[in-house]
Amino acid sequence: MTGMASFGVEIGLEWLLPCPDDFRSRVEGLLTSAARGADLRALSCYGLGPNQLNRLAKVVDGFQHQGSDLSPLSPFRLGVMGSGTLDLLVPQLVGSALRHGINLKCVSAPFGQIAQQAFDPASTLNKGHCDAVLLALGHRDLPLSQAGETEGYDSVAASLDFVRGLRNALREHGGAVVIVQTLPEPNEPLFGHFDARHSASLLARVRAFNQALIAEIADSVDILLDVAAIAHTVGTGNWFSLAEWNLAKLPVSMACQPLYADHVARVIGAMRGQARRCLVLDLDNTLWSGIIGDDGLDGIRLGQGDPVGEAHLAVQHYALALYHRGVVLAVCSKNEEGTARQVFREHPDMILREEHIAVFQANWSDKASNIRAIAQELSLGLSSFVFLDDNPAERAAVRQHLPEVAVPELPEDSSFYTRVLAAAGYFEAIGFSAEDAARTAFYRDNARRVQLQEASDDLDSYLASLDMEIHFAPFDSVGRERIVQLINKSNQFNLTTRRYTVVEVDAMIKDPAHATLQVRLKDRFGDNGMISTIVLREDPLSGAPDTWQIDLWLMSCRVLGRRVEDAVLNEMCRLARARGIRWLEGIYIPSDRNMMVRDHYARLGFEALGAQETGETRWRWATDKLRPEAPMRILNGQSVGSRLD
């Protein structure tokens, strides 16, 4: 079998709308589009099969060769190496990456040259300037496939050693993060139901390998792609086609390649900060069955003992689990606010409560306008949002007016709402830190700050009332995960929009030619966490001596308007003077999303050094000058100073 029997459609992308009938003509229209990147992404957000993804990939390849501007898509170079024939998979990856905001360029290893490509410093992959390498191995590439074990030989350990060697070599010679996948379990048992218990069976070896690999990856900079879990979801008999392996050495059946490619693209999107951060929930017939305004508190269906009520309860359980892993929850409903809040406060079977909701929009305005208001209050871009609504008309309206917002297509049966939302992978994570878990509190507290600012008479009194405390420290291994996250997801307050991998950040930590800062902020409402990262390097744009270039300066939009940038600039000057640096040089590289900081250096008083034809502007600052700061306590490394006015 090569079908996708576990899903309602062949390729298993059930959260997406079906491919439109005019797909081919719309692809042709891309050639004359003025917004190619946005239009490519919009067209990729359908349930596309292999042929449609191939067609999109050809268009992307043409644009890449022409050097076309595909913003707002983020460029990414992916090395691809592994089992069997991967040439047919590459277009699926390129087409699927568009859906996750990525302009993907693949560098493929020649067939059958896994070890050669990893261990040769001059190989295609190691010289390919890859941001990451997809190590797509199967059990046939490893000693696991040996029929038996000789005395003293452990095929699981040998397989782990081999994969570890590949990963280390790719990082050492190519400087790339490795995306390494677990192995799908074989579908041909040797001992029947005793297979999992007998160490000689391939199934037992594959499971042991996967468990050990997962534990090992957890302590490394590499990233796990859990292919075993994906194959389980669709059935291993569907995942791997014996006929297609014998015919063309396909490691994943053609029917499953769009699903596999989507999962790879999710991981790449998460590496580039494209994962969603906020789930906006409709209420009536989404969190409960019925219309609260008509049916009343006693008339809606929610809770145990009722199959419909249990289905909606499952949605709430899943939303609450997302909340605890750092996804922000908001409400967007056409309802009277008091009536809607009553369910959260008084219904005994409600799992979600008001304290879990960062912003509560219940009124009679259109939902697109309400989602915009939620985004403004949370200081989040619309591309961070997922909107869950049972009503097809409301879903269509939000898709039309807010194309940046992800809107999963839901079936009529509410029992499948949770499964569809989970399967879509909008909130993909490549790591999880204490700061991630606290993110919901960050945004809830930020909404309270917005309310305080609106009630304050002037900015100075508002800033003084916040009782801010700012902490500066160099990059370190403890903050590394959040640093990489900020670098790759910050688009608006980002002067250069340069992206760095965890491998490159590790190199900066050790390189004396770089100076780095991670900045954290607290106030009376709570901890904002890490809100800014700075990279300074000894490579001045002008070539002048005693000068540092501000290679990277980015900040979270949550803290805009609090004059944090003045304190950050002063700390850069303090750090520079300690190393005998007299000048800082900054560059603004325009993108379609960072126009808000176009005049950043001018506002701070930097001296203009000139503009380039590309729109870049260059600026200089003397490190013996200081900016007036907002009232805040300054914590520098382990030493504590006070600059309270």
Image (spheres, rainbow, N blue to C red):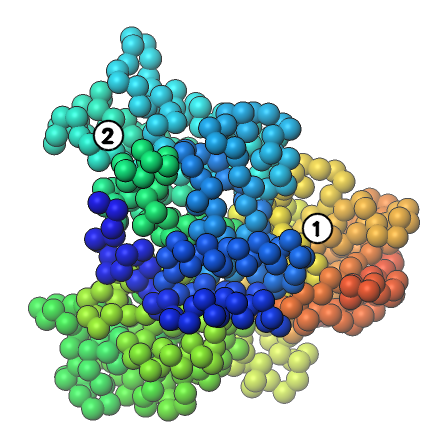
312 sits left or right of 378 in the view: left
Q: Nearer the viewer, residue 239 or 582?
A: 239
Q: Nearer the viewer, mark 1 or mark 2?
A: 2
Where's the N terminus, which quadrant? top left
Which residue is depicted at the point 17% across and 26% down? Answer: 190
Where residue 465 appears, x then y in whole percent?
Answer: 60, 75
Amino acid at the residue labelled 1:
Val
Percent of width and height locating residue 597:
70, 69
Q: Residue 203's mark? A: 2
Task: Name the amino acid, label 2.
Answer: Leu
Q: Is residue 152 positioned above or below 259 on the image?
A: above
Q: Along the polypeptide, which appears first: circle 1 or circle 2?
A: 2
Q: Which residue is mark 1?
A: 535
Instruction: Identify the image quadrant of the C terminus.
Output: bottom right
Q: Position of residue 280 (x, y in %)?
A: 38, 73
Image quadrant assignment for residue 296:
bottom left
